[in-house]
Image (tube, grey):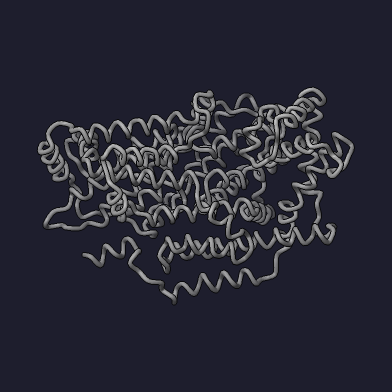
Amino acid sequence: MAKKEKKVTGYDKYVDWKIFSIPVILLFLLLLMPTPYGMKDVGTEYRIGPKAVIGYVIQSYFNTSTSDAAQWQLLAAQIMEKNMNMGALTRDRYLKRDLKWCKQNKIKADKSNFEKAYTFIDTQTDDENYLKVMQAALSLRKDGLKYEELSDKDRAEADKGAWFIKVSVAMGVFVVLCFLTECIPLPGVSFCIGLILVFTGVTSRKQVAMLYWDDACWFIMGSLMFAAAFVKTGVDKRACLMMFKKLAVPNVRWITLIFIVIIAPLAAFISDHALAAMFLPIGMLLYQNSLTRDTPSDPELGKMLMISIAMACNIGGPGAPSGGARNVIMMTYLADMFGMDIGYFQWITYCFPYLFLMIPVTWLMINWRFKPTITSLAPAMNHLQTEINRMGKWNRQQIVAMIIFLVMVFGWFTEKEFYNMGIYPVRLGIGVIAIAGAVAYLLAGIVNWRDYQEKVDWGVVWLYAGAIIFGRTLDETGAAYWLARSAIDALAPLGMDSGLPLMVTSNGLTAILTNLMADGPAAAAVGPIALNMAGLVHPGTTFLPFMAMSTAMASSFAYCLIIGTPPNAIVYASGYLEPKDYLRVGVPLWFMGNIVLLLLSAGYWVFRGFGGLPGF
């Protein structure tokens, strides 16, 4: 049995050089291949485009060059260029910016220059003129800059951008093959990503350390810490029994259905990170207490419970705008590019039916792909009841652990709103709150550091840190944009450039990218291209809002890889799952998700229409 457990974690393996040589050789082959013109074109857009746009804006508004412009004029142009990258083309969006926004987007600004720039946009230009300048600048960046027409200096810069894209694509092939084959311990892949980026010059030795960390990594670390505190105090036992004691027949099929029915709708309104973290100790407890002397191990049962939690979190996000940043990104693109608004409740009426369809599909898929030996969890429930009876009433440690947890949950739900309302002077982020909770458990004497050292899977933390830097590189170098543009351009001659075929193409491409990078950047990479094409072939029709919603929904289809979403990484920390287990259920769910989305859009959406707009 010990050997089997080692196989599950993969941390006890050494590198399988026969298999590992394949991704290594492919990495070097891709780096040595001639750079395609498309990469040079995107390199031009990403490396030369910002400078060209700022120069165009300054010339249009102030009739001077960038070098001669005043500081406030340069600042106005920089804010407009950053807005353009976000798809925010309207003057109204500019007027919502402040110094805090400039700092977040790494634009140097002081109060005096910001106020001068703001006053100019507010008083010296109107909505129509502003939009005209922004659209012309966007056209310049995307179509007006030609690689072969650049100066030697700019061409060298564009070549550098093309090299970064090639490195990112080669690294993507390397990472995916390593994850699928497990030819190297997975946290080791995370460190390989940083080494590749430094050795190829994409980032510096100082920058790479900063790129590894993110609020999501803090959250995963903090959530695994509070799960350890729950297990130590026995709160997980009480929570588990409260959830399932009403079941007449606690069969594993019904328990997985309860997991999905509870988690998926909540994920439309609550952070999927938080839900995965809350249910992880419950799933682990159910598995551990279901084992008997006759059946001391049932890997399929552990996999089934863990994957149910992760997939329930993943399918719930499309249900409401609050289900993920991707939803708000696509709503913003639609509003700024075409002036069409989707309201919060309106989004729910169009997209929540997806959950009603996917909940039974997900449940059936999981029960089809995993066949546990143990099917009745009644012994687990009885064992839990016996242990809780032995504990007696809630003790001090359990009460304190629960209070800290509830404060954390309250913080997760409210930190963004309270910051926007001015109640919090700084944006905390759910990761900081999770770590604060983990520290609170230490201060309250609930746990000591040995508990965290032994019970937290630190490899998963580093694994997701690698996913963060990988996704950021695909996004910031333009590699994801190049992949999206190349795929859509290649499919255009096949008649996939309009109507439902274009929507299917966009959905599929987004659904692939989102398994490699965060859902927001995946939607941001495909969304503008797909919406621009939609605006050309079906202007002013229902196709535009439908494309926005479907692209956002497809970016939640990160079912196939551990690095796809934080919930996937969080449940992997249980030690019961292997990377191939995500593929077992993730691949069929990926296809089913795309099919359900197509049926939803071709049936319900087309039949219902959208706000009086003509059909397509």
In percent of width and height, residue 165 lies at 65, 59
Residue furthest to the right: 63
Does residue 190 appear in this view? yes
Asked which quadrant contains residue 160, the reply is bottom right
Q: Say whether residue 50 is left or right of residue 476.
A: right
Q: Say whether residue 258 is left or right of residue 171.
A: left
Q: Is residue 146 above or below residue 531?
A: below
Q: Say whether residue 223 is left or right of residue 563.
A: left
Image quarter hosting the C terminus:
top right
- Of residues 72 and 593, the one drawn nearer to the viewer in this rendering: 72
Q: Say whether residue 465 is left or right of residue 39.
A: left
**Residue depicted at 30% across the width and 44% down the height:** 227
Image quarter hosting the N terminus:
bottom left
- Of residues 303 and 395, the one drawn nearer to the viewer in this rendering: 395
**Residue depicted at 27% across the width and 52% down the height:** 302
Count of numbered tags: 0
In percent of width and height, residue 524 lies at 61, 44
Does residue 491 appear in this view? no
**Residue depicted at 50% across the width and 27% down the height:** 424
**Residue depicted at 59% across the width and 33% down the height:** 331
Asked which quadrant contains residue 283, the reply is top left
Residue furthest to the bottom: 18
In percent of width and height, residue 397 lies at 22, 36
In percent of width and height, residue 122 lies at 76, 24
